[in-house]
């Protein structure tokens, strides 16, 4: 007997003239308007995705306006120099202690301890060139640790491997070291920060200096804090890290914040290990978290997902429930191509993230090239996010907020509704997207899991391959 799940997939594929989905890895199952249609339970979690043709990108840019973003203008930097942002947030100093003393649900001693522990690796070792929290050293260091007996040797001879196999080796290593997804892109210099802004607790307390791309032999950090990326480092390996579904479901609350911290700690470890692997093969590598450049457009270029209304990357397999890191390298690698699977069309019909944002920071209107303030890059067509409003919620509660991730219809475990949504989004049918949204809401997806229940659940819904 054919179940509903199989009929949804089969009917959709039949209308497109595509083959069945009993495929273990990414495979081409057909074409739409010249774009290849791919299927892979492992990489895309059951979604059909369209892989762009060479040169096509799933975003629009106004070249006359776009310029490299200054890290000093991101909201985490602004709280250190922008008096308006600082004063609006400093009013809530001490809220963590008050929450603990009053045993506020979701903000108890248990919640803060869990969150703090999750940040251990990122907090202790995650500093590095261009990263807030430290200017030198750390696992995001630009300087190689040096493998045994490999200094001065020529690069690995990969002549017996095809370009596809070499790229697969690097991506497999990324997954081995802890990434959930990995992709490769040619490094677009427009996504490199124009300047770094580093907050340290040594002397000097702040470093504000340019990031340059020049014809030099190796990455440099100059005495004035200027960072120099060699022109030869033309590729970037982008890494995505799944955050625990049950923990994210508790937002706003401690387990959700712990899921975020755990993502950052895994980012730190994995990016450092992958960079050392590439260095051990005889090439240069710069591991980065949020530093050095904009991770989301690099991830889009690397085929990991699309930009959603909530201002985050939405992946086919995990939705927006991921954290991102990257490794810039001069290792010759075959790049992936961007993909699309209906995110823009669905976000136009949805808006749940905007409706559920406690800071009213997410745009409810149409996409625009215009920024809200200096924390947005001008010249990119998207839904701009009011980052100071978002971060003010963090200050008010004493923990970060990700309600937008929790309620996003793309953030859900496997199931018939998810499969149906996957099959129908991107069909240029706004009415059908709205129907699927209503079904999603009626099924209870996106509702908050009471933080105390997180610890009492018998089974954790943590998606494994």
Image: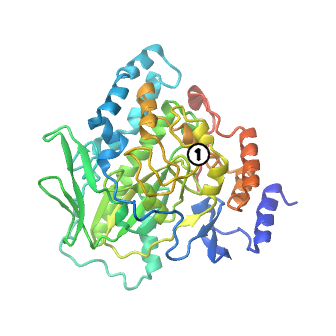
Residue under the image location 76 percent in, 54 percent down: 432
Residue under the image location 70 percent in, 61 percent down: 428
Q: Residues within 10 Å of mark 1 (few under 14, many from 20)?
A: few
Residue under the image location 67 percent in, 49 percent down: 349
Is residue 50 shown above or below 115? below
Q: Residue furthest top?
A: 102
Image-based side of 255 in relation to 34, left or right? left
Quarter of the rendering containing residue 166: bottom left
Q: Position of residue 63 (x, y in %)?
A: 41, 65
Q: Position of residue 127 (x, y in %)?
A: 27, 47
Is residue 360 shown above or below 217? above
Colour mapping used in the image: rainbow
Which is nearer the eye, 136 or 15? 15
Which is nearer the eye, 160 or 312? 312
* Quadrant that contains the C terminus: bottom right
Secondary structure of the residue carrying tag 1 is loop
Which is nearer the eye, 339 or 239? 339
Q: Position of residue 329 (x, y in %)?
A: 32, 68
Q: Is residue 221 visible?
A: yes
Q: Mark 1 = which residue?
A: 365
* Quadrant that contains the N terminus: bottom right
């Amino acid at each position: 007997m054919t179940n509903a799940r199989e009929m949804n997939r089969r009917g959709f594929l039949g209308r497109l003239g595509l083959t069945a989905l009993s495929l273990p890895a990414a495979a081409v199952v057909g074409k739409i308007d010249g774009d290849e249609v791919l299927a892979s339970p492992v990489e895309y979690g059951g979604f059909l995705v369209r892989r762009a043709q060479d040169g096509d990108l799933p975003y629009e840019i106004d070249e006359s306006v776009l310029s490299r973003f200054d890290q000093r203008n991101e909201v985490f930097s602004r709280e250190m120099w922008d008096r308006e942002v600082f004063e609006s947030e400093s009013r809530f100093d001490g809220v963590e202690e008050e929450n603990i003393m009053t045993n506020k649900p979701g903000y108890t001693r248990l919640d803060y301890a869990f969150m703090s522990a999750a940040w251990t690796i990122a907090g202790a070792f995650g500093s590095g060139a261009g990263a807030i929290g430290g200017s030198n050293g750390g696992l995001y260091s630009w300087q190689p640790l040096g493998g045994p007996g490999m200094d001065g040797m020529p690069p690995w001879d990969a002549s017996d491997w095809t370009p596809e196999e070499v790229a697969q080796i690097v991506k497999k290593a990324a997954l081995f070291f802890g990434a959930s997804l990995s992709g490769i892109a040619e490094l677009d210099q427009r996504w490199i920060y124009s300047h770094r802004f580093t907050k340290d607790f040594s002397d000097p307390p702040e470093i504000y200096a340019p990031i340059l791309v020049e014809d030099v032999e190796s990455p440099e950090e100059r005495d004035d804090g200027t960072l120099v990326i060699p022109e030869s480092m033309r590729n970037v390996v982008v890494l995505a890290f799944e955050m625990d579904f049950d923990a994210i479901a508790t937002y706003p609350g401690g387990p959700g914040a712990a899921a975020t911290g755990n993502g950052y700690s895994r980012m730190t470890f994995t990016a450092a290990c992958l960079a050392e692997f590439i260095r051990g093969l005889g090439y240069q590598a710069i591991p980065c978290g949020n530093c050095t450049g904009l991770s989301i457009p690099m991830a889009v270029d690397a085929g990991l997902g699309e930009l959603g209304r909530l201002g985050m990357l939405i992946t086919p397999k995990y939705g927006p429930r991921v954290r991102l890191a990257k490794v810039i390298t001069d290792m010759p690698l075959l790049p992936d191509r961007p993909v699309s699977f209906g995110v823009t069309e669905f976000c136009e019909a949805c808006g749940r993230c905007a409706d559920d944002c406690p800071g009213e920071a997410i745009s409810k209107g149409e996409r625009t090239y215009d920024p809200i303030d200096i924390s947005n890059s001008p010249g990119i067509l998207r839904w701009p996010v009011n980052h100071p409003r978002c971060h003010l919620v963090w200050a008010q509660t004493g923990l970060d907020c990700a309600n937008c991730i929790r309620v996003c219809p793309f953030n859900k475990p496997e199931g018939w509704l998810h499969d149906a949504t996957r099959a129908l989004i991107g069909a240029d049918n706004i009415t059908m997207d709205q129907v699927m949204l209503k079904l999603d809401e009626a099924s209870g997806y996106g509702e908050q899991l009471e933080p105390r229940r997180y610890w009492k659940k018998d089974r954790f819904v943590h998606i494994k391959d």
